[in-house]
């Protein structure tokens, strides 16, 4: 029997066999691997176009969202007209624009240079909103963007949209409040075009938060803990997991229209096989050192924290790209195994489905997960907007 992970039998050809509906079309700028896109799709929107400059990220996004248009473009050089042409929507309106402009320039983990060139991409997100005038927009970034040194930047970008939009934010939302097993606070700027009877407030989003947290134990349930260091290739990273009736497993693994790589979905539904179990070859002295790190404590040399089964994962980070030294981000140590977590475990902690695909390499998989918006947070935010703009529409 083919199962969907949510109690529903799948169509013979999988979820992508269904025709695309007339869902409201949106654009995902700085799309990355697609955490924001997945949340938007589950909230009832159709991602018409996804843009990212990273070739590994856009390739993975294309695999997960095969019906969207994809392109590698520098947003700073993109016009609204060109965006519509790429999306194939020259005569149709983009209802929404979402995106998480690169945050490294604002991150407290970095040097927070006021004139970091990446900071200007935040401005260009709002420039495109002003050009295209969609019904709504959502921009996401790190808490560091609230630093007083960026007051002028925030004021300047909000001036671009203040006349046409009711803007809510900056609002700080934590992924753990929306079902992810990671702390990960992020700042959101939300705007809805001014129209009678439609209003947003910060409380709309904070009310959506849940008091019940999903722990690391809940998130990693059913994943094989015994990961071999020799599992270094994409082929060897595919492993069988255990199905669960837990609410978390069902929630993250439900399917939605036009999303997912058919081959990955088939392996998940037929055999419960999923990718991303890349091993890490630790030297014996590292393994010995990790063995002495208690749950919830941090290795003094590597600064890697050991996860606590009953706690939450610290914010997963992306590290730097090749232009900035290819520095590896801190990777948590498994709660009981003396190794760092795998990309699939990181994806579970962020709230990604088991059938969702990342890069076929460990390095880029971790970067994609660390750079992503948790799909659980994205879905909650976009669902609130959909209910405001399309009341009564499921």
Image (cartoon, rainbow, N blue to C red):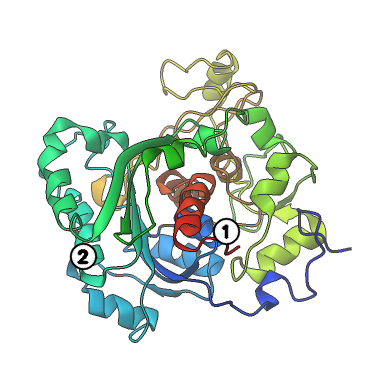
Q: Percent x, y for residue 304?
A: 46, 25
In the rendered image, which quarter is residue 79 located in? bottom left
Q: Nearer the viewer, residue 375 or 322?
A: 375
Q: Is residue 112 above or below residue 238?
A: above
Res 266 visible: yes
Give the distance between the C-alpha atoms of the residues marked 2 and 1, in whole angstroms. Answer: 26 Å
In the picture, the quarter occupied by the C terminus is bottom right
Q: How many neighbours does mark 1 have within 10 angstroms: few (below 14), some (14-19), or many (20 or more)?
A: many
Where residue 162 sits in the image (x, y, percent)? Answer: 19, 54
On residue 3, the disc is none
Element class at badge 1: helix
Residue at point 74% right, 58% down? Answer: 268
Looking at the picture, tell me which residue is in the foreground, 276 or 97.
97
In the picture of the structure, the residue carrying the numbered disc 1 is 42
The vertical placement of 360 against 378, above or below, is below
Residue 348 lies in quadrant: top right
Q: Which mark is residue 130?
A: 2
Q: Where in the figure is residue 245, as x and y percent of width and height?
A: 80, 42
Residue drawn at the location 26% of the way across and 71% of the way down: 132
Image point 61% across, 25% down: which residue?
338
| SS at badge 2 | helix
The image shows residue 274 at horizontal and vertical percentages of: 69, 54
The residue at the point 42 percent across, 65 percent down is 58
């Amino acid at each position: 029997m083919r199962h969907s992970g949510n109690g529903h039998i799948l169509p013979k050809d999988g979820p992508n066999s269904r025709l695309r509906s007339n869902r409201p079309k949106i654009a995902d700028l700085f799309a990355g691997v697609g955490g924001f896109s997945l949340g938007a799709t589950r909230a009832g929107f159709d991602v018409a176009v996804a843009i990212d400059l990273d070739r590994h990220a856009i390739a993975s996004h294309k695999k997960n969202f095969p019906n969207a248009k994809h392109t590698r473009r520098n947003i700073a050089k993109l016009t609204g007209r060109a965006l519509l042409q790429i999306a194939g929507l020259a005569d149709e309106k983009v209802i929404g624009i979402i995106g998480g402009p690169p945050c490294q320039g604002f991150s407290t983990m970095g040097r927070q240079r006021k004139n970091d060139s990446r900071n200007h991409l935040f401005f260009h997100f709002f420039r495109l909103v002003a050009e295209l005038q969609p019904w709504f927009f959502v921009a996401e970034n790190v808490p560091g963007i609230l630093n007083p040194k960026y007051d002028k930047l925030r004021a300047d970008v909000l001036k671009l949209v203040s006349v046409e939009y009711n803007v809510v934010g900056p609002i700080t939302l934590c992924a753990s409040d929306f079902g992810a097993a990671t702390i990960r606070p992020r700042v959101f700027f939300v705007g809805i075009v001014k129209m009678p009877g439609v209003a947003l407030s910060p409380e709309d989003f904070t009310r959506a938060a849940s008091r019940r947290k999903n722990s690391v134990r809940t998130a990693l349930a059913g994943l094989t803990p015994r990961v071999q260091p020799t599992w270094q290739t994409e082929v060897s990273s595919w492993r069988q997991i255990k199905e669960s009736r837990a609410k978390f497993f069902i929630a993250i693994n439900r399917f939605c229209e036009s999303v997912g790589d058919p081959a990955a979905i088939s392996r998940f539904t037929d055999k419960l096989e999923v990718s991303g179990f890349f091993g890490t070859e630790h030297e014996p002295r590292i393994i010995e050192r990790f063995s002495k790190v208690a749950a919830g404590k941090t290795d003094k040399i590597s600064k890697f924290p050991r996860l606590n089964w009953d706690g939450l994962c610290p914010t997963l980070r992306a590290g730097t790209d090749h232009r900035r030294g290819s520095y590896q981000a801190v990777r948590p140590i498994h709660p009981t195994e003396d190794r760092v977590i795998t990309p699939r475990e990181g994806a579970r902690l962020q709230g990604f489905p088991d059938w969702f695909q990342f890069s076929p390499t460990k390095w880029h998989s971790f970067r994609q997960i660390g750079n992503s918006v948790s799909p659980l947070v994205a879905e909650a935010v976009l669902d609130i907007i959909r209910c405001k703009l399309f009341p009564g529409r499921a």
